[in-house]
Image (spheres, rainbow, N blue to C red):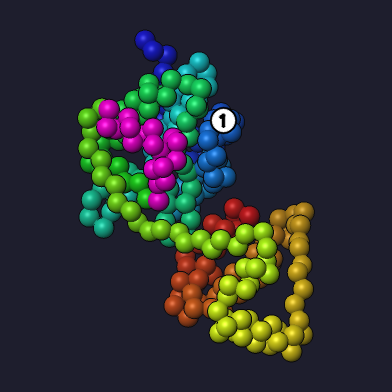
Amino acid sequence: MSGYRLRLYQEAAALAADAGRWDDLWGRSAAPPPTARARCVAHWVRTFAPARLFGLAVEHEGQLVAALPLVVGRTKRLLSVVRLPWNDWCAAGDLLLDPLTDTDEALDVLLDGVRATRRPLLWLDGVPLEHGPWRQFAAAIARRGQRAECHERYRIGTVEIGRDWAAYQARWSGNFRRQMRKMLKRGEELGGAALAMYRPTSRSEVEPLLRLGFEIEDRGWKGVAGTSVLRSAGAWDYYREQA
């Protein structure tokens, strides 16, 4: 007996109830996003995929040492898969892995759990395969002789500004500089702008501020297309509860 065993969470409430251990693993893992914490995952599941959770975790000596939240879904509306809690609105969950554990054994138990879901495909959107835990996960799949395919979905462009703002501005095209001057002048004519920072101390203060932000989004192209948060079923409730 290796001492590593699989734990399965099939209800959001069960995952939220074990948030202490799950979030302890989150803290020991390599830079996962805040939305990988237990209550964030449970909130996503309750909103977008009720009764479709396969929360996989590996226990060792009372601690969780690996975890992967999955939900049942369909890809291309045809094939039944298990996938990360992910949609066009937001992503919740990530691969959590304690770097001090026997990662090969922990990942083997985790992959046995994936197989036990009895779905023909594990479909992972937006996974950074160059990141340590995911690189180890891909290596574990290869070591077990299982088949996996990876396809680049998109690249994220970056602008190198450096530490000298004036030097960065000097690289702008003349047309862009003129456009920026025109925008600044228009802003001044409309009364100028000021930065305001709010620190809500109660739930009653959060909702109107959040709605104000999403009303700005709704006045743009997303509102025209009917895809803004305020015009999409479930999205407003999700972000309000998250906030």
Q: Is residue 215 visible?
A: no
**Magenta-highlighted residues:** 126-143
Find residue 83 and report its horizontal and vertical position in percent. Answer: 35, 45
Q: Is residue 136 above or below residue 47?
A: above
Main structural element of the magenta stretch: helix, strand or loop?
A: helix
Find residue 41 and report its horizontal and vertical position in percent. Answer: 50, 44
Packing grade of label 1 (10 A; few <14, some 14-19, many >=20) is: some
Q: Is residue 146 above or below residue 234?
A: above
Q: Is residue 15 above or below residue 84?
A: above
Which type of secondary structure does the marked residue at label 1 adopt? helix
Using the rendered view, name the quadrant where residue 174 is placed.
bottom right
In-image side of 145 versus 135 (left or right): left
Find residue 43 and report its horizontal and vertical position in percent. Answer: 52, 48
**Mark 1 lies on residue:** 28
Which quadrant of the figure contains the C terminus? bottom right
Count of numbered circles on the image: 1
In-image side of 2 versus 169 (left or right): left
Q: Is residue 23 above or below residue 77?
A: above
Using the rendered view, name the quadrant where residue 166 is placed.
bottom right
In front: 159, or 34? 159
Find residue 29 and report its horizontal and vertical position in percent. Answer: 53, 33
Q: Is residue 135 magenta?
A: yes
In-image side of 166 versus 18 (left or right): right
Q: Amino acid at mark 1?
A: Arg
- Residue located at (56% from left, 61% from top): 160
- Residue located at (62% from left, 59% from top): 162
In-image side of 198 versus 44 (left or right): right
Residue reaching furthest to the top? 1
- Residue located at (77% from left, 73% from top): 194
Q: Is residue 187 visible?
A: yes
Which quadrant of the figure contains the N terminus? top left
